[in-house]
Amino acid sequence: MKTAVRNAFLNLLILGALLGFLWWAPANLDNYKLRIINLIAINAILGLSLNLIYGMTGMFSLGHAGFMAVGAYVSSLLILTVEQKNTMWILEPIAPWLLHLQTPFVVSLVLAGLAAALVGWVIAWPVLRLGGDYLGIATLGFAEIIRILIVNLTPYTNGSLGLKGIPAHTDLWMTYGCFVVVLAFMVRLMKSNFGNVLRAVRDDEIAARTMGVDTFKVRVLAFTIGSFGAGMGGALMGNLITTIDPKMFTITQTYSVLMIVVVGGLGSITGTVIGSVLITVMLEWLRFVESPIRMGAFVVPGVPGMRMVLFSVLLIAVIIFRREGIMGTREFSWDWFFPKPAKTTQTKEARE
Amino acid sequence: MKRCFLALCVVLVAAGVSFGADTIKIGVVATVTGQNAFGGQLELEGMQLANKLYPEALGKKIELVPVDNKSDKVESATAATRLIESDKVSALIGPYASGPTMAAGEVAEKAGVPMMATAATNPLVTEGKKYVYRACFIDPFQGEAAANYVFNVLGYKKAAVLTDVASDYGVGLANFFKANFTKLGGEIVSDMKYQSGDTDFMAQLTEIINQGPDVLFIPAYFAEGAVILKQGSELGAKFRFMGGDAMDNPDIVTLGGEAVEGFLHSAFAYDPSMPEMNAEAKAFTEAWNKEYPGKAPNANAAMGYDAYILIYQAILRAGKSDPQSIRDELEKSTNVPTVTGLTSFSAQSHDPVKDLGIVEIRNGKKSYIYTIKP
């Protein structure tokens, strides 16, 4: 009981520290650093939602970019002003009912998640009858279908021209607010019985079914929740860079989320958070190899594109030396910092 | 050993940060990796050449700071933020292609740093922007001029269009071409589509051949455009092919061989084969051949060069190198001589009015054959 109180206290402490940081950061850090800190939160949301689908429930899904696209478009279309919509659709006029549709950003964010979840739910019915690599291929196909629909539904999406000048509402409070909610939800979920059911489905589906679990229903539910996260993450991402087009949501977008999940550790919430920090920061930090480096009299000319080479080498190293990712399936716990009480008394008794 | 390596890393990072203080920095959101690396690399080389020829302004050294964008929108926005915030650049030169330019442009606009786009021809790039300019013409003009050339100069009355529906550039240009061609009294006999990344165009080409047009307009990027030309000639197409500025590639003949003979494309008004070059273009070609022997320049390189010159001239006229003064002077640019013609901006329009060139592949050589005045 005491540990529960201690953990709650420490969690509150961490939350307080985060709040303090969010309050301090905008005034003291430049926009470049703030942008990266924002990206970390968004990548973490995307990573967590994919981890729920792939890491926790064992469904190899390559459809994340598709759900992100749904979220990004729904949210952007709901917050663009009427004048902006009028000037942007230069190929075909915008659908009249869409022109005056407008909501506050937070509402659009929730609707973006719901829309993505709905699409995910519809897709889940046919594709989740597949397993393993087949599921990967099928979800990849559906993500492409979503993207091609966006390209061709010009009256609603402005086709391949995309949307620009999306009013920016994404600040640290918004991204980290969403991140904390998603994180808390995931932690609660995985500690609940439903979390155990998900792991059971992942580890041995037949055994889970023998125990009376409706595995198909469980998988559909996990997939739908994951899609919700992807939609919300996509909406935040679109709003952060204030312009979106269908080309943003190709398979490479899925890979970059997948990379975060795999590097962090499949099935570990902590791992995904660490992975998103590491990969987002690394991609930017490694840029120093591209600028000319002066060492005394020597000047090493910078080679543009070099950081991608270095980055790939680092990824290969992670996969060779730590195949299970940084955290494996382990989770962060406050117990790491405290000696286990039961054990210490035992050793004391033994000593006496 | 480990410690040595660590120490080396620290030294490298520290060395990377220590730059001279008395410089004017121009940031480049460069496209040197990813899908558009080919054109982006040429642009960057054009800028570096311009930097070599005009290395100083107001007694200070001008330094180009290129940052790669992976041909990606998110990376473009991050790169622009990085250049503005950590490198404290006075001005930006934009990436290749319109999509990434719009992403970087939003950042520049918010930060109040002027940005010169190179070859981003989509009309939305500068729309409503105070700090974003471009060195090239825009797609409505290119589409109109191409339609005019085909209809009036070549006398073709029936055209077909094959559009990349996944590219904003392709869709926009195709639309402006079709609208103007029908307005002139021509007929679009076939309007086919494909997606970026496709490699088989046989079905569309067969259908187009059946309709018997005089010319096929392909507003494509080079990767797909080259394949379309090849498959068209394999199918025995009798009509002419015409492309847009993105089909400009110095190696087109080596890559395409027989299949590209007779191919036409519109271009920013520069090509090393131009018969009457202006003074800037002459100077550029000469300097290029000296700097990169054995490598032909093209319009992309010229656009990179021009973007640098426009900012350089604005700095000279302003007599100051802070972003706001450069922006204000850029807006007052009137008839600045650049490689691709005289460039002017005004408060109403950040899109210069420029000539359009027509290039034809004739006897296995790129030849600049026609200039269309706006």
Image: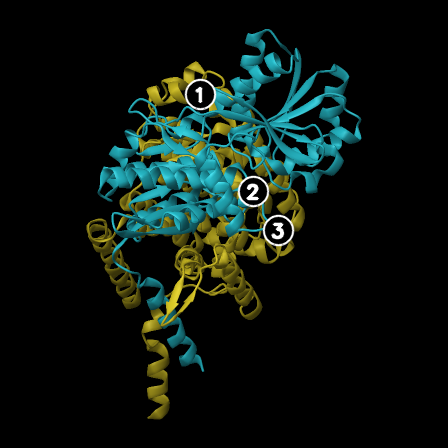
Chain colours: A yellow, B cyan
- Mark 3: secondary structure: helix
Q: Which mark identifies residue A209?
A: 3
In this view, A332 is above or below A89: below
* Residue pointed to by mark 1: A89
Can you tell which quarter of the image residue A140 is in? Answer: top right
Q: Dividing the image into 4 quarters, which one contains the N terminus of chain B?
A: bottom left
Tell me the kind of residue under disc 1: Trp
B151 and A9: which one is in front?
B151
Q: Position of residue B34 (x, y in %)?
A: 54, 47
Q: Kindly indicate whether the residues beneath marks 3 and 2 are on one polypeptide chain.
A: yes
| Amino acid type assigned to the residue bearing label 2 in the image | Lys
Chain letter of mark 1 equals A
Give the mark nearer the N terminus: 3 vs 1.
1
Q: Residue at x 36, y 37 (%)?
A: B310
Tell me the tag on residue B79: none
- The foreground one among B265 and B293 is B293
Q: How many marks on residues?
A: 3
- The spot of residue A117 in percent (x, y) is 48, 36
Letter of the chain that mark 3 sits on in the rendering? A
Mark 1 or mark 2, earlier in chain = 1
Of circles 3 and 2, the one toward us is: 2
Assign a secondary structure to mark 2.
helix
Which residue is pictured at 67% across the width and 31% down the height? Answer: B361
Q: Are marks 1 and 2 on the same chain?
A: yes
Q: What element does badge 1 sit on? A: loop
Q: Is A80 rendered above or below residue B55?
A: above
Picture residue at 76% right of the left edge, 24% below the top: B237
Instruction: Quadrant for residue B8, please give it.
Output: bottom left
